[in-house]
Amino acid sequence: MSSPGIREIVVASGKGGVGKSTLTASLAIILGEKYRIVAADADAEAPNLHLVLGIRDWDETIEYYEGRIGYINQDKCIKCGYCYDACRFGAIEIRNGTYIINPWICEGCYTCSFVCPVKAISFKRDIIAGHIMVKHRTPYGFPLVSSSIRPGRPNSGKLVTEVKNRGKAILRGEGLLLVDAAAGIGCQVISSLAGSHMAILVAEPTPTSFSDLKRIHKLTRHFGIPPALVVNKYDLNHEMTEKIRRYAEEWNIDYLGEIPYDDKVPGSIAAMKPIIEAYPDSRASKAIWKIAEKITKILENWEDWRLKHLPERIEPFIPLIVKPGEKHPSRNT
Ligand code: SF4
Ligand code: SF4
């Protein structure tokens, strides 16, 4: 790398199931031969990078505490029902005439406690919201940090930030943090992108994937992150691949390459081995090696590449406010 420090590279896609984790696992192995690397699974709701890497157990499992849950003191409750009407998450239930808070749904927003006339609602703080898991040495040498949020717990984005922080702590100031982001553009993805240095966007040549690519690309512009692009299964729709390629050109996204459809990939996933290990001579593996070579060149000429692909302008965040009774602009019906 051109200068010491930690480089955070996020592999992201607006759409799930486009081969993001498969690519991340193989890139981690290849780049790990040259750099100190930590892989981070930033999908706290559906972590799977460890499965692609063949990891069945963890060296460390750390409890993650976060948030609060309301509960009703039944001795004080006068059963007025104000809290039931006020909770917009539907977390308050009536069972046998008693008002109770469902801990799986409660977001700890305090609203119910403001409307309760007899102060019957209290909160439990710092509940276990999930776990952070660490494998100090994967079968391929580098460490992996992952996490798992408990069902119904909010703030999975905060947990992703913790995962990244732990990865950075393991790197101790220098190396690559390769982050496998969740699908979509939700809070977990935002936490994955925040503070990162490069986004590798992964798309498939389908209208839905192309549409989602534009959405995730917009998010990278909002964070001012230079983007690169990989098209997976590019040969399934050459016309659409060409459209995506032109989009990359138009927006100055570094087009890292294309991975062909390869029926060896499902076999590698079933064997819990990254494709470059399971089938090193496969077409997909060869394409991934070429992509990794390009990334290595980028890291060697980091500052030049960064300046060349920095978004021209920061995409502003414009909140969309839909008032009661108004139609959501993105819905046609
Ligand atoms: S704290 Fe918020 S989410 Fe939880 S029960 Fe009260 S109003 Fe509902
Ligand atoms: S607002 Fe307070 S008193 Fe009324 S039902 Fe809820 S907990 Fe009970």
Image (cartoon, rainbow, N blue to C red):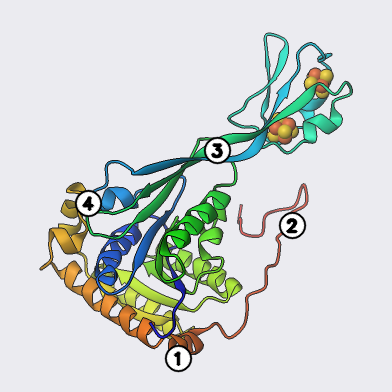
Q: Is mark 4 on a helix, strand or loop?
A: helix
Q: Earlier in the sequence, mark 2 or mark 4?
A: 4
Spatial CA span between label 3 and label 4: 29 Å
Which residue has dot 3 on it?
A: 129
- Viewer-closest of 163 and 236: 163
Inspect the image, locate mark 1, and give the three-letter code of the amino acid beneath it.
Asp
> Circle 2 is placed at which residue position?
321
Q: Tag 2: Cα neighbours inside 10 Å, few (<14), some, or many (≥20)?
A: few
Q: Which one is in front in this view, the residue at disc 1 or the one at disc 4?
A: 1
Q: Distance between the residues labelled 2 and 3?
A: 30 Å
The N terminus sits in image quarter: bottom left
Q: Which residue is drawn at 84% across and 13% down?
A: 78
Nearer the camera: disc 3 or disc 4: 3
* Label 2 to label 4: alpha-carbon separation: 42 Å
Q: Which of marks 2 and 3 is in front?
A: 3
Q: Mark 1 points at which residue?
A: 304
Image position, residue 155 (x, y; %)? 59, 46
Binning the other alpha carbons within 10 Å of mark 3 as few (below 14), some (14 to 19) or many (20 upward) gives many
Alpha-carbon span between mark 2 and mark 1: 40 Å
